[in-house]
């Protein structure tokens, strides 16, 4: 979903999951603006400050906790209903939209993702955009793996990437790319 008007108010919620406490940031109309893990809270807050400098951030309840609870309990399709919007370049937004076309239980290589957006030589740029995804899990950057099927970097940690792919029933080479 492309970014639109900047929010005036953002709400931060914390949600216990089987792989750590998640941080959900929603705007005043309930769209998810950021998702990360408490391990990365300082970086996420800095990102919010850069992208939404005028927004007030307060603690509160996200309307998407039920969808995340269902997802982390095994309903791989539960996050499809989550509305999100993100601040990014047109290229990043095209990558993030393409990530949303990878169904739960499937994976795609960075090279194939670059082909999918019509930029077959932009594999590294696709990787950078994938890593800059502010709404992880909902925009399923964890579904991108190496060409040989190996696990590659994941901002939330490879242990979480492995767990998420296992939850979704995806097939992958369980070794980490060098």
Image (tube, rainbow, N blue to C red):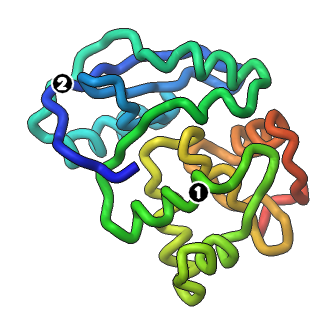
For label 1, the residue is 99
Tag 2 and tag 1, C-beta contact below 8 Å: no
Q: Residue at x 69, y 25 (%)?
A: 71
**Residue 44, image x, y percentages:** 37, 39
View extreme (bottom): residue: 121
Q: Nearer the viewer, residue 102 or 92?
A: 102
Which residue corresponds to the image point at 67% horizontal and 78% vertical from the top-left?
A: 111
Task: Name, please, the residue furthest toward the front.
Answer: 81
Q: Which mark is residue 125?
A: none
Q: Is residue 87 left or right of residue 62?
A: left
Pointer 1 local density, CA inside 10 Å: few below 14, some 14–19, many at least 20: many
Name the quadrant containing residue 68. Answer: top right
Image position of 178 (left or right of 127): right
Along the viewing direction, whichever of 120 and 132 lies nearer the viewer: 120
Up the image or down, 162 lies above or below 101; here it is: above
Q: Secondary structure at mark 1?
A: helix
Q: CA distance from mark 2 to mark 1?
A: 27 Å
**Percent of width and height locating residue 45:** 30, 35
Q: Is residue 169 left or right of residue 71?
A: right
Q: Which mark is residue 9?
A: 2
Q: Which residue is pictured at 81% across the width and 46% down the height?
A: 105
**Residue 5 appears in which quarter of the rendering?**
top left
Q: Residue furthest left?
A: 54
Q: Position of residue 154 (x, y in %)?
A: 62, 52
Please rate how many residues cluster around mark 2, counting C-alpha atoms within 10 Å: few if below 14, some from 14 to 19, many from 20. some
**Label 2 residue SS:** strand
The relative height of residue 102 versus residue 22 in the rendered view (above or below) is below
Please tell me whether residue 125 is drawn above or below residue 25 in the rendered image.
below
Where is residue 32? Give x, y as percent: 40, 32
Mark toward the start of the polypeptide (2 vs 1): 2
Quarter of the rendering occupied by the C terminus: bottom right
Query: Residue at horizontal 36%, vertical 36%?
Result: 33
């Amino acid at each position: 979903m492309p970014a639109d008007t900047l929010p005036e108010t953002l709400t931060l919620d914390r949600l216990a999951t089987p792989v750590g406490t998640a941080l959900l940031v929603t705007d005043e109309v309930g769209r998810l603006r950021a998702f990360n893990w408490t391990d990365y809270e300082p970086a996420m807050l800095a990102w919010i400050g850069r992208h939404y400098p005028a927004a007030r951030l307060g603690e509160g309840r996200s309307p998407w906790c039920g969808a995340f609870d269902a997802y982390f309990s095994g309903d791989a399709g539960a996050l499809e209903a989550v509305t999100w919007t993100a601040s990014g370049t047109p290229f990043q937004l095209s990558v993030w939209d393409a990530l949303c076309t990878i169904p739960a239980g499937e994976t795609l290589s960075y090279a194939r993702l670059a082909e999918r957006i019509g930029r077959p030589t932009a594999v590294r740029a696709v990787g950078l955009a994938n890593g800059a995804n502010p709404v992880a899990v909902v925009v399923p950057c964890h579904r991108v793996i190496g060409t040989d099927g190996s696990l590659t970097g994941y901002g939330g940690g490879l242990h979480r990437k492995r767990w998420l792919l296992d939850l979704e029933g995806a097939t992958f080479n369980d070794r980490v790319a060098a």
